[in-house]
């Protein structure tokens, strides 16, 4: 498994949109994204740089590997 890249919230939003997620709504600096098939929902903070733990939690919630994320970026 590769190391987690340093990415912004907007980069993660763009990558998730490529795999079928859409922006459901935004509450402050948190973007709620959802995919219908298979159902999955996650919250992405719209920060300049996401903490590694936050990014790891997002990837775990949507069942996406670090290598897959790198390919989408």
Image: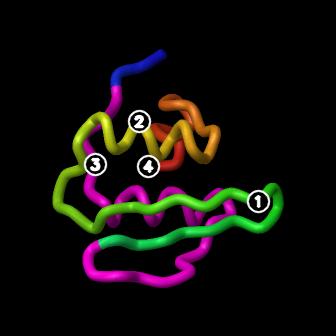
Give yes or no for residue 7 being in the magenta stretch.
Answer: yes
SS at mark 1 in the image: loop
Please name which of the two marks, 3 or 2, marks the residue nearer to the observer.
2
Q: Which mark is residue 56?
A: 2
Instruction: Quote the CA–CA distance across marks 3 and 4.
Output: 9 Å
Q: Which numbered mark, 1 or 4, is in the foreground of this view?
A: 1
Colour option used: rainbow
Q: Give the mark toward the camera: 3 or 4.
A: 3
| Real-space CA distance between mark 3 and mark 1, rounded to the nearest whole angstrom | 24 Å
Point out the tag, 3 or 1, that comes first from the N-terminus. Answer: 3
Assess disc 1: are there few (<14), some (14-19) or many (≥20) residues with their C-alpha within 10 Å of its C-alpha.
few
Cα distance in 3D space between marks 1 and 4: 22 Å
Q: Position of residue 52 (x, y in %)?
A: 28, 35
Instruction: Give the Cα separation between the discs numbered 2 and 1.
Output: 19 Å
Mark 4, Cα crowd under 10 Å, few <14 / some 14-19 / many 20+, is few
**To which residue does mark 1 refer?**
39
Q: Which residue is mark 3?
A: 7
Of labels 2 and 4, earlier in sequence is: 2
Q: On the picture, is 30 further left or further right than 1?
A: left
Q: Which residue is mark 4?
A: 73
């Amino acid at each position: 498994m590769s190391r987690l890249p340093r990415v912004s919230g907007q980069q993660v939003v763009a990558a998730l949109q490529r795999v079928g997620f859409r922006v459901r709504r935004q509450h402050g600096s948190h973007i709620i994204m959802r995919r219908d098939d298979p159902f999955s929902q996650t919250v992405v903070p719209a920060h300049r740089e996401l903490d590694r733990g936050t990014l790891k939690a997002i990837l775990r919630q949507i069942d996406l590997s670090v290598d897959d994320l790198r390919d989408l970026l």
